[in-house]
Every structure is written in C-alpha cells, then in structure tokens.
Amino acid sequence: MDIISSSQNDKVKYLNKLYRSRNRRKEGVFILEGKRLIEAALAGGADFKQIFLTPAFFKAAENDNLLAALKLKAEFIYLETSLLKETASTVNPQGILAVVEESVFKGDDFYRQADRILLLDRIQDPGNMGTMIRTAVAAGFDGIIALKGSVDIYNQKVIRATMGGIFSIAIRQKISQAEFLAEIKNEAADYEVLAADIEAAEYHFEHQYQKKLILMIGNEANGLEKKLLKAATSKIKIPLAGEIESLNAAVAASVISFEILSQQLQEEI
Amino acid sequence: MDIISSSQNDKVKYLNKLYRSRNRRKEGVFILEGKRLIEAALAGGADFKQIFLTPAFFKAAENDNLLAALKLKAEFIYLETSLLKETASTVNPQGILAVVEESVFKGDDFYRQADRILLLDRIQDPGNMGTMIRTAVAAGFDGIIALKGSVDIYNQKVIRATMGGIFSIAIRQKISQAEFLAEIKNEAADYEVLAADIEAAEYHFEHQYQKKLILMIGNEANGLEKKLLKAATSKIKIPLAGEIESLNAAVAASVISFEILSQQLQEEI
C-alpha cells in the first residue's frame, strides 16, 4: 500500500484542482466527501473514477462492504490522514473522498427520462439550491434543469444540502436561457410550463396540473427573468395572508411541488 | 450634536453587551441593524429604546421621514461611522442601529392574541428559524412559540431571514417543554395540537384542520421530542414520493402551513 503524504503528488494536485468549479466542469466530474454521501452515490448508480482514502478508513471493519463494492469500480489512492483532511472542504471528511462522473444528458435524453421537472433560474444560495433538489426528489420530480448563473450543483454545500437526493434525479446544469426556450418549443413542446406569479388569476391549489410539467423557480431576490415568465404556459399564485411581500424561493418551490403531488395522490386514492 | 468616537463610552459599551444573547434576554431588548428593518419595526409598532446613528445618516434628506417618526419614540445617540461599523454585526449596517423592546407575552395574553400558532422545538439553524417565521406570517399564522434549546429569535441572522415578518406576529421564546405541555392542558386546551409523523394514518392534505391550532415542528436532525409527539391531538404525514428519508424542517412547516391556508381559502371561495 503506497501512502501519499505530499500535497505535491500529482494525484493530490489533480484532486485539489477539482475543488474549483471551472476545473470540475472541464473534467466532467465532481467530488463526494464522507462515507454517507458515497454510499448514497453507490446506491444511485454513480460512476466512480477515483477513491481517496486513509489507511485507517481502509482497515476499519465497518467499511468492508462499502470498500468491496467500490473496489470493483475505481482506483484506490491512499492519503495520510492529515493530507486528506487538509484537502477536503468539510471539517470532518471521515477518511474518504470520491471523484465521480457527472451525468451528462443531451436535451432529448433528458426529456425522455423526466416528466416532472424543476427549472432553477439563477439560484444563488447553495443551501437553497440543495434544499430545492432534496424537496423535488421527495415530491416525485424526476428532473432538474439549472440555468446559467445558478450556483454549481456539484458544490460541496449544495451536495450536502440535497441529503443524497442528487443521486436519484436527472440533472442538467449551465443551460442557457436561449437553449431552454428553444427546447420548450421543440423536444419539450408537450410540457406544461409553470410559473409562480403574483399577478396570476389562479391560486396554486385551484390549478389542474398536467402530468408532464416544468415548474420554473427564479432568483431569490429578483424572481424569474422576464422572458421565462413570458414563456410560461400556466401561471399560478401562492396566497399571502400576512404582511410579507414574498416567500423564500425554496419555500415557494416546496408549496407548489407538494400541491402537485397531493393532487396526484388524491386522484389515485 | 455630540458624536461618540470611543468604544469605551458607556452607551457604546451597553450596546456591545447587547450583542450577547444572555444580556439581551436580561434587558428584554434586541437590536435592529439597517434602515429597512427599522422601518419594518416602526410599521409593526415596535417600542424603540435607543437609536444609534451616524451624523451622515442623520443629515441625508431621504431619511427625514424615518427620523421624524423615531424622534418621537427614542433617544438618539450619534456615533462616528467607523465606530458604528465596528459595533454592528452586518457588514453594511447603513448608518443606523436601534435597540427595541422585546414583546413579552404571558401564557394567557398570548393565546388570546393567537389562533394559529407555530411551535418550534430546538430549531438550530438561524436561516431555518427565520424562514419559518417569514413563512408562518405569509400563511396567516399569528403566533410563534420557540421552546428552550432553539436558536435565539432575536439573533441578527434570524431577524434578517424573517424579512420583516418578526414584527407582525406574536412571539414567545425560551419556553420550557413542561410549561408548554401544561398550557395545552389549561389555557390552550381548546387548540388542536398537530404533529407531522411518518407513522400517521392521514396525509396532510386529507386532514380537516381546526380554526385554533398549534403546529409543532421539531429539530432539524431529530424531529420532535417524544413527549411533544405524544401530546399531539392530531398526527399527519407528508407523502414522500422519491428516495429521500425526510424533508428539511422549514420545508415541512411550509407545506403544512400552506395546506391549512389553502383549505381555509377554498371554504371561503
């Protein structure tokens, strides 16, 4: 077992590079920190490229099952505990990091896989972004589109806030607005395109949702960009009973997503 | 106009003390930073004790209306810009801070004012706490009870995340679990006491909510404490359609609060 102790080692330098969004993007990969996230990724069928781990993690009997499964999938690289800690962004990476391939969907493939899609327009806060992905999965959505200008979904804070949800939903990100607007006229022309809009005539609980739909949620401070709002095929409003001007973006997404799921379940009951 | 430049000045030392939760509690006050929050507090009928401001803020014509209203309510204390910035917790306190009296409700008064109450059990994250208060106000709730062990509601991060909502809802905090459990047997015996519970028989959208209710939301990692769960008069579950074990606490609170509001509006339509 070769144990790397120097941050000047080429494999460690490569790993360090991947902590920058631009480099991850170029390589088409992202990083997972800690046993729990790696187990969730394994269950979600992720493609592993490298596993960075400490000798102590390798030796602990409680990790045997996980390691046996990972051995079949990726190269193991052993780092000294202090070096792994220094490299990771979490305070306690629990002795293991993984480099995983980003799933890449072309427009067509994506729409073939996803019927109920959440579109995120320039969402800035990693916690908000992660919570929305977690909530979308819980509410039975099967696709996420994050437009250019949104925080990187493969940022560690976003991944952690999804609570493993990132591995059970199809994801496309860094899509331009123009590209998305073209798609909803072509390959996604049969989707209902929904926007929350304070001027809408219908409340969110009055609307009859279509089976195939794209729910668009806008930037925390400014809402949806005008052209997106204009492209909506349906507009709904969430009632505001108290002296509050607007809802948090993740709250608005939650309220609508669970209304959609509730309607579906009520029909099935 | 006396302008204070030393952090050793007694009034500045007093202000500094109030940045610690324990001291705020003892004095029964909290701090607001920035024009926008102070305007919201004024509109909400807050009791101001001191206003700390810079000479530049005092002189700017666009602040005349706000200052005229505040003059009638509290002592003005002028600080040099650098001293005010150094004291405040926000990067840009915009030249004004206010010390405001905490609203104190005894059990009886509170229940006379509030019909629809959100109870928060050991909520840890200030952003979550603030978002839940903002959402509760938006959904027409009129009371908040935060049990002991929750983050201080008058923490700057919580106040900011409420987006002004903190001023339009009755708030009681640092209530012990025993005190609350006694209240729902006595002065609050006519309230429906609701808990979200994965084992519940009814979905949140099937339940008929009472007019007077207390919705209990538990700690982010551990949920509601056992005795609270046992004290619930109704239990509901939010459906989880995807591979996610639980919802974020603020998301769960949002989904249920807006279901309650939606039912009310549907009856009224």
Image: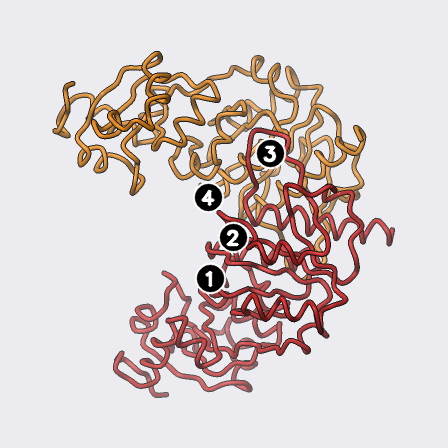
Chain colours: A red, B orange
Label 2's element? loop
The chain letter under disc 2 is A
Residue B236 horizontal side relative to residue B254, left or right: right
State the residue in front, A174 or A226.
A226
Viewer-side label of 4, 2 = 2
In the displayed structure image, the side of residue A269 where residue A2 appears, left or right = left
- Separation (CA) of disc 1 from disc 2: 11 Å
Q: State the quadrant of the C terminus of chain B.
A: top right
Question: Pointer 2: what residue?
Answer: A219
Q: Where does label 1 land, which residue?
A: A151
Label 1 sits on what residue type?
Val
Q: Chain of mark 3?
A: B
| Residue B249 rendering spot, x and y as whole percentages | 57, 45
Q: Chain of mark 4?
A: B
Q: Nearer the viewer, residue A110 or B210?
A: A110
Type of residue at label 4? Answer: Asp
Residue lying at 78% horizontally and 53% vertically, measured from the top left: A209
Task: Check disc 4 and report the residue beneath it.
Answer: B125
Identify residue for label 3. Answer: B138
The three-letter amino acid code for the residue at tag 3 is Ala
Q: Are marks 1 and 2 in contact (CB under 8 Å)?
A: no
Which numbered tag is attached to residue B244? none
Q: Label 1 is found on which chain of the structure? A: A
Residue at 56% in and 39% down = A246
